[in-house]
Image (cartoon, rainbow, N blue to C red):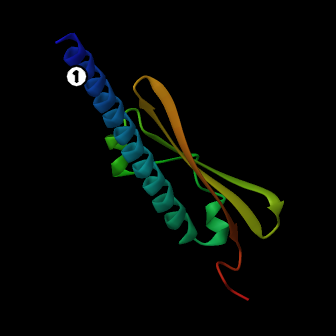
Amino acid sequence: MALLGIMVMTLIGVLVHGYTLLSRSKQTALATQICQEQVEIIRNKSFDNIVALGTTFTNDKLSSLLNGQGIQAIESSVGADIRKLTVSVFWTFHGRALRKDVVTLITRSGIDKK
């Protein structure tokens, strides 16, 4: 009976840990999707207008993440016609602060233009 009890408790512990990992993976995938959507929104703006963007952004999906926040940063130090865009999502998971970043370069001529 004791051996069966130990096996059941171990199995419960493994299932709880697996559920926690699955939940964290889902939240990370959602944060990645939010970042990608924001990158596409910015890419659809004209090159001259992206420098005037604020440092935060909103997305309806951020409310699905505990304390979800969206941050964006545009750096012009790369070159005159190139901007480095970093889009980040911050959230809390089981008391730990998590972060997902997507970084890309945006050029004045756009994507695949010669």
Residue 91 in the image: x percent, y percent?
A: 45, 35
Query: Which kind of residue does numbered mark 1 sit on?
Result: Val
Q: Is residue 5 left or right of residue 44?
A: left
Image point (24%, 15%), residue name: 3
Residue 58 in the image: x percent, y percent?
A: 43, 49
Front residue (pair 61, 28): 28
- Image quarter of the C terminus: bottom right
User: In this figure, which residue is indicated by the disc labeled 1?
Assistant: 8
Image point (46%, 61%), residue name: 37
Label 1, secondary structure: give it: helix
Image point (40%, 39%), residue name: 24
Q: Is residue 112 left or right of residue 35?
A: right
Whether 79 is drawn above or below 114: the answer is above
Image point (26%, 19%), residue name: 9
Q: Is residue 17 left or right of residue 33?
A: left
Instruction: Judge whether residue 58 can be spotted in this image.
Output: no
**Residue 14 picture quarter:** top left
